Image: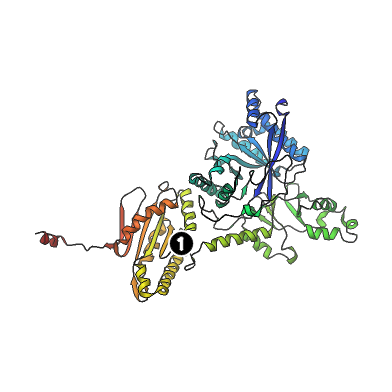
Amino acid sequence: MTGLLEDVRFAFQPLFNLHTGGVVAIEALARPASRSVYELLRDAARAGELLETDAALAAAAVRAAAEHNNVVPLHVNVLAATVSKAAEFIGPLLEAMRDTGRAPDTLWLEIGTPFSRLRRENLRAGLDLLRTSGFHVALDGVGDGDVPLALYTELAPEMIKLDRRIVAGLAIDAGKAALVQALAVLAEHNGAQLVAEGVESEEQLAAVRRLGFGMAQGNLLAKAGRRPNVETTISAALTKLPEGELTGPVRRRASGPRVTDFLHPATMLPVTATAEEVRSLLAQGTVGGVVLVDELNRPMFTVDRNRFLLAVTGPYGHALHAKRDAARLADRPYILPSDATGLDLLDLLGQAERQRMNDEVVIVDARDRCLGVVHAADVVRGIAEMKVEQAASLNPLTRLPGSDALAREVDRRIATREIFAVGWLDVDGFKQVNDSAGFAAGDDLIREIGRALADAAAVLPTVQVGHVGGDDFVFVSGLDDLVPLSSGQLDSTHAAGGMAVSMSLATLVCSPGSVTDYREVSRLLAPLKKQAKALRGDSWVLGRPGSDRIDVLRGANTAPQVPPARRGAVSA
């Protein structure tokens, strides 16, 4: 095995937070001089040393990173087969961690394929051992390997890395975008981070951003190098969404961004560190603050750069403080759990002492271990951008969301395999209303309908409504709320300028797998809407994808029905 690793060197590629533009971790990539990593592992398998070699590579990656005093989290690759026998092969990795002084919870193990021939109970046992040892777990190459679907929930990875071949097609392939939508829902359910790897073009990055990825890596952002580049940042131009429509809808959480969307690596020192040790770190210029942690990496104090340096560089400051505990010049940390939102952070800092309103906030995991820090400025900017996007999508007349928001909601329900209905509601003869009563009366009517729909959605939990233009309103609803919502709108009387108006409603009930996206739903609603408009008075028709049957729930035929006796008399 020693001979197999003699020519292996390592390159380091940053992972970027797309919200802040900063580096959040470094991945160590094995680079054998005379062959590929695949060929190296293939030769090891032929020699009967595959798992030993894989574990030795992971340990070598940790040692290589330590040569560069890398303080940000490190990602290393391991095979799923090695993880399934972690009790036998974890030794070299633990030894490398001890020798280099790297804390286990700053190491991410990217678990790679193949999975199909492994005993599931062995894989779970191996992961339990690694997690107990403090390591973080990511699934690597997702979307193009043999990862069983059940593993996404059974193994509960903290990170899902989308394979570069999937990323390459996101800008042009709606199917791949739909796959990401499903993964995004799953990741959010499990509290996992979604990472795009292999981003090579601005088109790919735009698609990644539009689909809601918080992290990415690839040669467009930064190429792998012999030294870890932790100070680089993404150009501001590359973090903004372009104008125009791209494949797939924007994904946004209704509750707002999480604090982990804005996470920076924390610079940590033991709580027993001296002021001189802290000063040496801060003197590097790239460190904004230091988190003092106990032996379990739980934050005890935070050291603010400006206040600390002001104390130790003032008159007699070095003599007074250098050899004493840095905690004397530190503050009790502001702490939030990893599932907190950006609004939670702003609320926390809103109650802070005035001089600490710009302090870093420490984010902790379920075991209260430090995951990283968040800056208030990043959160404010992120929430502001989200609010601007939301405001731009609202209809200026009714202040209801437009097509983009409804597309996201429909695609979300499709991805989670819900049964739901989509309704298309409009005013009959709206042009005549404007021509007869005036456009101001027409605007008042549209506002009235919009308020009625918004009020109904506020008390019906499964309903989202939108105004897609003119007199056209669309809603998405669960089946339990469909009848109360629809009947409530059609039972209400509406008028414009003293002229009574009627309304037409077409609804499509979608079962799991019956539709693929919002665009198809829109197309299937069109003939139903035509059928509803052909009826007299307030009308409501209902259809289902794949069925020719149309149920007329309200409204009368345009042509009056002739009684049977009268028809006979006429025919005579």
Q: Quadrant of the C terminus?
A: bottom left
Residue 559 lies left or right of residue 235; in this view the side is left
Side of 277 relative to 438 (left or right): right
For the question of whether residue 134 can be seen, the reply is no
Looking at the figure, which quarter contains the N terminus? Answer: top right
- Identity of the residue drawn at 36% across and 61% down: 505
Neighbour tally class for label 1: few under 14, some 14-19, many 20 plus, Cα within 10 Å = many
Residue to which mark 1 is pinned: 466
Give the residue type at disc 1.
Gly
Q: In this figure, what is the number of numbered marks? A: 1
In the rendered image, the residue lying farthest to the bottom is: 498
For the question of whether residue 283 can be seen, the reply is yes
Q: For this rendering, which residue is in front, 159 or 529? A: 529
Res 344 → quadrant: bottom right
Q: Where residue 175 appears, x then y in whole percent?
A: 48, 44
x and y percentages locating residue 383 in the rendered image:
61, 60
Element marked by disc 1: strand
Would you place residue 489 above or below residue 100 in this image? below
Q: Single out the residue that lies furthest toward the left.
A: 572
Q: Colour scheme of this structure image? A: rainbow
Between 411 and 131, the one lying in front of the other is 411
Q: Quadrant of residue 316?
A: bottom right
Q: Residue at x 33, y 60 (%)?
A: 540
Residue 367 image position (x, y, % from top left): 67, 49
Residue 214 percent coordinates (x, y): 61, 50
